[in-house]
Amino acid sequence: MTLVFLVSLGGFSVLLGRVVLNEMDSITSITTDAASKLVTRNLAQGQVDFLRLKETVRAAEDGGDLDELRAKFDLYYSRIKTFQNSPKLEELRTNSEIVDLLVRVRSRLDRLVPLIEGADEGLRKGLPELSRIILENEFDAQTLVEQGVLIETRTRTNTKQRLSQTLQLLGGVLIVLVVALGLAGLITARQFRRGQILSAANKAAAARMRTMVTSSLDAILMLDKRGRILSFNGAAEDVFGYSRTEALGQSMVDLIVPDHLRRFCIENVANFLATGEGQLVDRGLLQMEGRKKSGKIFPVELSMSSSQAGSDLVFVCFMRDITDRAESEEALRRARDDALAGERAKANLLTVMSHEIRTPLNGILGSIELLETTGMLAEEKRYLQAMRISAELLLHHVNEVLELSRLEAGGEAEQIRSFDLQDLVAGLVDGQQAAASARGNKLYLQCRLDDQPIVMGRAEGLQQALLNLVGNALKFTQNGDVVVEVERLGDETGRVEFRVCDTGQGISQTNLGRVFEEFVTLDSSYSRKREGTGLGLAITRRLIEKMGGEISVESELGEGSLFRFAVPLPAAFKRVPTHATDRPISVAPKRLLVVEDNDINRMLLEKMLQRQGHQVESAVGGAEGVEAVTNNKYDLVFMDISMPGMDGIQALKKIRKFELAEDSTIIALTAHAAADDCDRILQAGFAEVLTKPVTQAKLAEAIERHTSETNPKLSEMETSDIQQFVAALGEERAQGYLTTFCQDVAQLQKALDDSGTVDEEQQSEAHRLAGSAAVLGLVALRSCMLEIEAATPQTELPLGALELAWSEAGVLLAPHLAGKSA
């Protein structure tokens, strides 16, 4: 059907062309030649351009746009040039009068070019001149149009023939046009169909997007470059309290941003538009604050991104109300702060209670110790023994609480050192035999260490853990057996397993998992038979864990219990030096000063020290103590820490500041037993810390440590481990090692003597030799090597002390270097 229509239309077009040719003669009077039309049209357009330029000049004089004036001038100027140069207007330039008109018009316009191309200010000032010259052209412009009409009239006859030829082509053009229209129709129909499909897909995608935005739990806002809201979803209405109608078109900053954040938002968006960077746009999730319609400020989580589509830029904001989360976090912070405050309060309470309990305990135990040396009846001795037991039990409870507090606070672990494990366990078992006999128990020790009793580990922690287990076993066993077993497991870590087994009352399966908890006593009734804080096993577990082990328990109610744990205790060669308490303490009488504000404690200390044969003076408070050392010289000063007015630390600082008592050692006495308290006291400059209550034995040991005049050479020989080293390695191997050791020490000594300074390589060598000296028990030499290792360029090297220590060590090493057994 369409094809028939197109063919018919083509035939009709041909017929129409023939009719037009037949009627040409009758319409020549109204037919216009194409060339004439071109001339007339251009002249008319030139007149229009002139009139527009004239109108633009008038507008510019009234303050109009100068750029528009320049554009109209350029257009008119180009039109005149076209008249002068275009080949299509050659007919126009055959008229000399028109050529003269064009030259005059062009000349005037050329005079205006500098003004037009100049600055706005100059152009604005030259507008009157420009207007005058434009008006001069007005007559010539009109004359051009009139002359053009005359030319059109003259050339109309010439265009008749060309018009006929054009009409002859009309039929063919129409045919081609119809065919093109047909093809265009087909293409348009196809494109229309594709457009419908794409439109449907876009509508579906838009619908899905609207559904996602509408159902989103987050507030979603779309903004234009000026920050005006283009889209506002339902969640945004719920979050901010504005309806969509209220929000659309409004500035987001004015609507929902708090006052204190407005400047930040405005500046960051402006910076992003200028540079593409900022702290707000395309920066991921940010935590800020928003403002509701009610004026309430609340925390929000914001993500703001940009989207560019051609020249259009929009911002998409996702916001989430995080009030609940912020409140939860704040509650957690408050809970944490409260917990920390509680921990601090507990630590402070323990510190105060430790001091307040230990101070009177010092008086009680000290008085008991003094009374025991006086003549008393048997009954009085029994009463005194009961007093001692009660006081020591109270002190034990205080120590347990403080030890647990230290472990919970992550107190510094005991340093690893070598010790005789077999001696430690045997001594502990021997010390508990009396307690075992008191309850009708038999206490046994089975020790299997494969002839490797010397180990590396934490002796004090291990001793305390074993003591707690053995003490518990004895306490809950009546007329039974308690066995302590120690066995080396033989693995690569050098672990040793400890087992404490008893035939006591046992633990039920219900309570088995609770025994290592703090403050748990399985019998908490008023009539309970065993006293205690319930901390012993909790402390034991923590101590063992700090040593790298784990404790477990097996028990049957009424049958007994088995506690076992294994800790790394690798074998070592070094022998433990004999402790001061293992031999009689005999110190020459010394002049001592006791600084103590508590009358009872001061009196007890005086008596204890006087009974050891010392000359004792006392001072009440820190100020009196400072005055005493200013006026007198003492071998040793015992100074209490907690004193009113001037405490012990303040007194020590004043003594050292004014260089008083330079030759006197000052030892701290305190009832504060916490580890951080002791560290603080030592850092203040005290030589040692004695924790109350103190005994005569502790006082005697401290005096000997700080006032003994033992010959260094003899001390070196007492603690030397050379013989045991030779026995462990064999004489030949030991001799080779010792020879190399002597050569290395001599070489280092010579290098230091020559240079007088120490470099990093020599410090590393000193560190290595210090370790070797420690193994051989050469204490003085090891001390010199450690000083060299720690030396700085400004430090004076201990070359004299090194020479003396090396000379003394040579005496001890000489027999073994010669291959003889000492």
Image: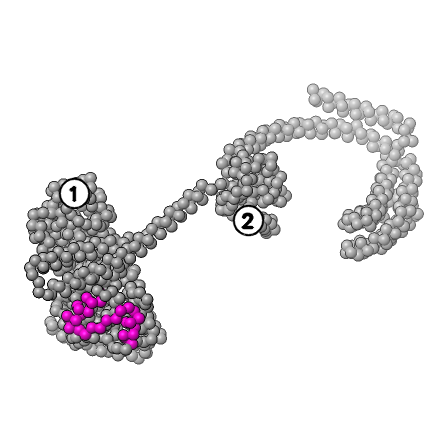
Are the residues tagged 2 and 1 within 8 Å (C-beta)? no
Q: Range of the magenta residues? A: 601-630
Left or right: 307 in relation to 773? right
**Residue 261's disc number:** 2
- Residue beneath the point at 13% across and 47% down: 476
Q: Residues within 10 Å of mark 1 (few under 14, many from 20)?
A: many
Between 674 and 615, the residue placed more toward the observer is 615
Where residue 507 is drawn, which disc sits there? 1
Inspect the image, locate mark 2, and give the three-letter code of the amino acid beneath it: Leu
Is 495 left or right of 233, judged from the image as shown? left
Q: Quadrant of residue 32?
A: top right
Q: Foreground: 805 or 373?
A: 373
The CA span between labels 2 and 1 is 66 Å
Depth check: give the residue in front, 315 or 193.
315
Tell me where residue 171 appears, x and y as whole percent: 79, 28
Which circle's residue, 2 or 1, is located before the other in the chain? 2
Q: Is residue 747 above or below residue 519?
A: below
Residue 765 visible within the image: no
- Characterize the magenta stretch by its predominant secondary structure: helix
Position in image of residue 529 (x %, y %): 14, 46
Is residue 587 within the magenta segment? no
Which numbered disc covers residue 308?
Answer: none
Where is residue 749? Give x, y as percent.
26, 76
Q: Secondary structure at mark 2?
A: helix
Res 596 → quadrant: bottom left
Q: Amino acid at mark 1?
A: Ile
Is 406 left or right of 491, judged from the image as shown? Answer: right
Instruction: Please name the colour scheme applied to the rendered image.
Output: one colour
Query: Residue visible at 69% across and 20% down?
Result: 1
